[in-house]
Image (cartoon, helix red, strand yellow):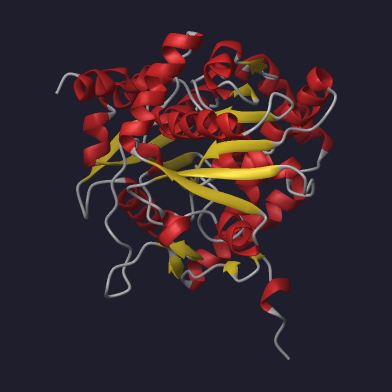
Amino acid sequence: MSRNITEQKGYFGEFGGSFIPEDLQKVMNILEENFELYKNDPEFLEEYNYYLKEYVGRENPLTFAENITEEAGGAKIYLKREDLNHTGAHKINNVLGQILLAKRMGAKRIIAETGAGQHGVATATVCAMFKMECIIYMGKLDTERQSLNVFRMELLGAKVVSVDAGQGRLKDAVDAALHDLVENYQNTFYLLGSAVGPHPFPTMVKHFQSIISEESKRQIIEKEGKLPTAVVACAGGGSNAIGSFAHYIDEHDVRLIGVEPAEAPTLSEGVPAVIHGFKCLTLVDEDGNPKPTYSISAGLDYPGIGPEHSYLKVSGRAEYVTVTGDEALEAFQLLSKLEGILPALESAHAIFYAVKLAKELTPDDIIIVNLSGRGDKDVEQVFQLLNK
C-alpha cells in the first residue's frame, strides 16, 4: 500500500519530492544521509557557529528604520540586516553550512548556479577558504547585468561559465548545473543556492537559512516585548523568505508576506508542475513548459518557487504579493536617501511593499523586513536605468 503523499520524504503537502534520474537519486540519498547525520552533530555545529561569528559576522542587527517609519506614518519598520554579512547577502548562511557538509563528504569539486551573483560570490568565497575547485554557472544575460559580481567570483578563484542556452537567465544556469552534476556526480558537490530542487535541497537550505528568523524573533522580543505583526521578504527561488519565515510559521498571529516581481508572479499565477526535479507552483506556457520570465532583479528571475512556499500559499498560511520593477527602483532610492542603506534590487521589492503595508497599519504594529542583500552589486544597473 502506497503512503499518502504528505508522508513521503521531501513533500510539503503536494509540493516537493524528487523527480530525477536513478543515478542522481542515489547522489541525493547520500546527501540526505549526510545532512541528517551532521546537522545536529555537536562538532559540526561548533565549526558552523564558529565561522558564522568569526567569518560571516553574525549575529547581524535588527535595525529600527526610524526615518522610513516616519515617512510611512504607520507601523514601525525594522530591517533584518543580512546585507551586513560577509559577501553582502543572506546567501553565505546556507553556503557555509553546505561547504562544511561537502568537506565531510570528501568533495573536492564544487558547482553552483547564480542569478544576481550573490550566491556565486558566497560559494566562490568559501571555496577559496576551504581550497576547493569552484565552477559557477550563470546565465549570459545575468553575467552582463551583474558583471561586477562576475569579476568578484573570478578574483576569488572561481571559473564562471556563461550559459547562453534558453533565455540565458537563472533557470538556464540551473539547467547547466544539474547537467554537470549528472555527468560528474562521483566527485562533485552541487551547492544549490535557493530553497528549490529535489529533496533534500529545500529542507537543507531552509535549515541553514532559518538562522535569520531565529535571530529576528529573539531580537524583536528584546526590543519591543512582542512578536511582529508581519514579516516581509522578497521571493524568487525563496531562500531568504523561507529563512525569514521559519521560526514564525507556528506563530499564527504573525503574517508572513512574500513579495514577488510582478513580471514573474510565480505564486500569484503559477500552477502545480515539475521543474528542476521537484514539484511547485510554476509559470508555464500553453505547452506546459516553464514560461520565459524577466525581472529587474536577476535573483528573482525564476519561473518556479520553493515547494514549501507553494504549500504556504495554497494552505493560506502565507500571503504573496507582487511589486513592479519600477516600484522596486523607487524603494531602492527611498531607502538609500532616508536611511543611508542601499538595498539589493531583490530586497527593494520587499521594502516597497513594507512601506505600503505600514501606511495601512497603526503605530502599535511592527513589520520586520528581511534586507536580504546590499545594493552595491546593482548600482551600475540602477544608474543605467535612471539615466535612460
Residue at (22%, 51%) from the top-left corner?
A: 167
Residue at (85%, 24%) from the top-left corner?
A: 225
Q: Horizontal and vertical percent for residue 273?
A: 45, 70
In the rendered view, does 290 fall on the left or right side of 252?
left
Q: Is residue 176 or residue 298 the one in the foreground?
A: 298
In the rendered view, does 24 fall on the left or right side of 201?
left
With respect to residue 356, does 82 lie above or below?
A: above
With respect to residue 354, does 137 lie above or below?
A: below
With respect to residue 102, does 336 lie above or below?
A: above
Q: Horizontal and vertical percent for residue 106?
A: 59, 43
Q: Horizontal and vertical percent for residue 61?
A: 67, 16
Residue at (77%, 31%) from the top-left corner?
A: 217
Q: Which quarter of the rendering shows the N terminus?
A: bottom right
Q: Which quarter of the rendering shows the C terminus?
A: top left
In the rendered view, does 88 fall on the left or right side of 216?
left
Q: Horizontal and vertical percent for residue 203?
A: 65, 52
